[in-house]
Image (cartoon, rainbow, N blue to C red):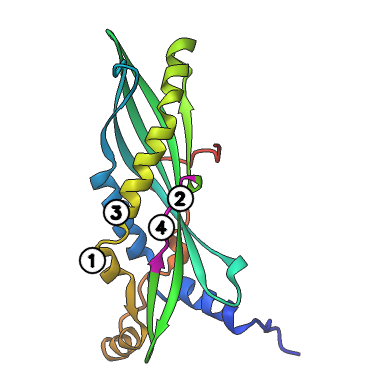
């Protein structure tokens, strides 16, 4: 009796992309774009009494299949990062560390003869989760920092959506599987690292907890 386990064609598509297609380059593109863009400043009325400047850095990228889409094929990029929020409240300055989780959903589109496109969907605020570390802040300052949380989330959503529509990302997300296969046969080179190896890739330690 064969030990082979039958799977659906859609499951085969998920496995094929995870094991054969190197979608890691897409996560690296998004990572680079976010590192370049998510920084700036914001203010909270009245009279701009609370002013904050922030900078964001991606720490880890994970790629997971979106099995709920079956029989369609899709993935989710989970980008874990660190954000430093520098607050200036009147004459008081305080730094707040924020753990950030950004979920970017990808649809897989297919074109003839064997071309795949990984298309990021626009991010909504619910896909950005923040956790403020207020252990070193007085209660009053922590409360004021929390007032800026919706503004920080809005900035992240705006910048992510602006950058995932960039031409460089679209190029990285277009994969000619037939060309890859022909190149591999001609050169005798081993296939590129599978997307599964992207999951859990440590850049600077572990991942933040998933909190709102």
Q: In the rendering, which numbered label is found on residue 162?
A: 3
Of the image marks 3 and 1, the number of the one nearer the N terminus: 3
Residue 87 location in percent, x, y?
32, 20
Q: Residue drawn 52% across and 74% down?
A: 73
The magenta segment is 119-125
Residue 173 x/y as whole percent = 33, 70
Q: Residue furthest top?
A: 91
Residue 138 seen in render: no
Q: Say which quarter of the image contains residue 71.
A: bottom right
Image disc number at residue 124: 2
Q: Would residue 2 be found to the left or right of residue 28 on screen?
A: right
Q: Residue 167 carries which label?
A: 1
User: Residue beneath label 4, please?
Assistant: 122
Residue drawn at (55%, 76%), measured in percent from left and top? 72
Q: Tell me the mark number nearer the camera, choosing from 1 and 4.
A: 4
Instruction: Check if residue 124 falls in the magenta segment.
Output: yes
Report the residue that reaches farthest toward the front.
Answer: 46
Label 1 vs label 4: CA separation? 15 Å
Tell me the residue at 34%/47% (across/down): 158
The mark that comes first in sequence, 3 or 2, is: 2
Q: Residues within 10 Å of mark 2 (few under 14, many from 20)?
A: some
Q: Is mark 2 on a helix, strand or loop?
A: loop
């Amino acid at each position: 009796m064969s030990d082979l386990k039958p799977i659906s064609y859609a499951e085969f598509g998920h496995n094929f992309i995870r094991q054969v297609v190197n979608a890691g380059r897409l996560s690296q593109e998004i990572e680079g774009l976010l590192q370049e863009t998510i920084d700036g400043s914001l203010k909270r009325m009245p009279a701009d009494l609370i002013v904050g400047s922030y900078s964001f850095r991606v720490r880890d990228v994970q790629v997971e299949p979106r099995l709920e889409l079956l029989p369609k094929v899709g993935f989710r990029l989970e980008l874990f990062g660190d954000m430093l929020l520098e607050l200036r409240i009147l004459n008081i300055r305080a730094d707040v560390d924020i753990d950030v989780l950004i979920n970017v959903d990808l649809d897989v589109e297919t074109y003839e003869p064997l071309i795949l496109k990984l298309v990021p969907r626009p991010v909504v605020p619910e896909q950005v989760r923040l956790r403020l570390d207020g252990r070193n802040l007085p209660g009053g300052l922590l409360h004021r920092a929390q007032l800026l949380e919706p503004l920080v989330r809005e900035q992240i959503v705006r910048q992510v959506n602006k950058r995932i529509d960039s031409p460089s990302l679209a190029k990285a997300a277009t994969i000619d599987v037939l060309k890859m296969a022909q190149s591999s046969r001609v050169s005798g080179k081993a296939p590129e690292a599978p997307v599964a190896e992207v999951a859990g890739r440590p850049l600077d330690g572990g991942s933040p907890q998933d909190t709102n």
